[in-house]
Image (tube, helix red, strand yellow):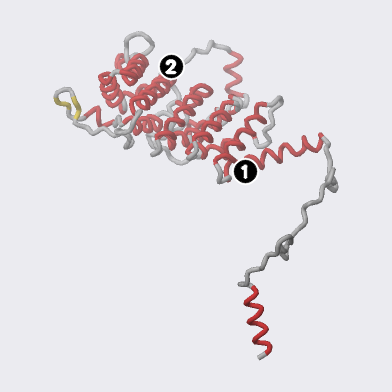
Amino acid sequence: MGSSNRKKKEKKKDFQKAKLKVGKAKAKAANFTDTSFKSKSIVVNQQTVSHADEAADKPAQFRQTLGSAITAKSDNQRRDALSYMINQLSANPPNNPVGTAGLLTKLLPLLSDSSGPVRTQLLKLFRVLPQAEVGPHVEKILMYIRGGMTHLSADIRADTLNVMEWLLEVAGDEVVSCPGGWLKTLNSFSSMLGWNPSVGSAVVSKGWTSASKTTMGVATKKGIPEAQARQIAVLAKFLEVGFRPETPTPYDPGRYWDNIYRLPETANPFAYLNLFGTPRDEDSEMYPDRLSRQRVFEAKWKGAIFTGMDGAKREGGAVGRSASMLDKVLNGDNRGRRPGLEISSS
């Protein structure tokens, strides 16, 4: 009984309110830690401020920051990580221990990141990459760009168009001539604008086509004319690069024999043969010259593009101005002839 009464008293202590007395401080907790001390300095064992060690740690820090940019759950952490890498790539000499190929492989999925500031910093990082090192990876970049162009989010589609413009500036010829770079990209523009290839052969009555028009489910949202004008403007730049006449190379006997007997200077020079790759369909094929791109454009996309362009002209405003710019591109080389007509006449 004595033991039982003692246990009951101990349990009651937890529920008893302490009686405070005037002039006496409150009793300290059992786990109280005294933090009232002051110190003029803190000594850390094995501390060093060697600049050589800092330089040696930069590659490791860059790799760690790259990992944070990919895996961090916080939008601010991903944005700050990209800002740090931009500073490192902009330094003289630039600090990039993983190379351009490694950066693109890790960071391209961020094109569809849900945070706008992260996507903005990503584009800034792309702009500081060496332009000569971007060309060999155009096919991989385009794969993510096409995914962003058909994304459900209007903001992601708009930011992806900025990346497309950057890629056309630094490696335009590679964009339109790589496997899938021509037709697959036109398919993505078609999904954005609702210009389906079936529109060209649709039944037309009273000036309007019977084919349905889809604009990624955002036709009722505010700011759609500006977004559509932007899409048409980027499409015009893409077609301008694709239909740009090749610069003729003067005949050089030495260069001729170098091309036959010396090692190629470009990466994968026989990619158009597709010797070891998977079989390609029409959309995945390479169209390395202007004539082949014009031919397939006339066969598959001419009707849809011109029908959509004429409808955009009738809308007027920013959309109409972008459509007029597209019309100038399609009229071909300022000679008043469209690419398809030029092919037919040859």
* Neighbours of disc 1 within 10 Å: few (<14), some (14-19), many (20+): some
Residue 61: image x %, image y %?
A: 70, 40
Q: Nearer the viewer, residue 345 or 328?
A: 328
- Residue 289 falls in image quadrant: top left
In the image, 207: left or right of 163?
A: left
Q: Residue 163 carries which label?
A: none
The quadrant of the image that shows the C terminus is top left
Q: In the current view of this chain or complex, which residue is farthest to the front?
A: 22
Looking at the image, can residue 264 be seen? no
Q: Mark 1 points at which residue?
A: 67
- Residue 266 falls in image quadrant: top right
Proximity of marks 2 and 1: CB atoms separated by less than 8 Å: no
Q: Is residue 329 above or below residue 100?
A: above
Of the residues shown, which amino acid type is indicated by label 1? Answer: Gly
Q: Nearer the viewer, residue 8 or 307?
A: 8
* Neighbours of disc 2 within 10 Å: few (<14), some (14-19), many (20+): some
The quadrant of the image that shows the N terminus is bottom right
Q: Is mark 2 on a helix, strand or loop?
A: loop
Q: In the current view of this chain or complex, which residue is farthest to the top?
A: 335
Disc on the earlier residue, 2 or 1:
1
Residue 47: image x %, image y %?
A: 84, 44
Q: What element carries label 1?
A: helix
Q: Is residue 13 above or below residue 263?
A: below
- Mark 2–mark 1 Cα distance, whole angstroms, equals 40 Å
Residue at 31 percent across and 28 percent down: it is 300
Q: Mark 2 points at which residue?
A: 244
Of the residues shown, which amino acid type is indicated by label 2? Answer: Arg
Q: Nearer the viewer, residue 143 or 272?
A: 143
- Residue 310 falls in image quadrant: top left
Q: Which of 51 and 311 is in front in this view?
A: 51
Residue at 42 percent across and 20 percent down: it is 237
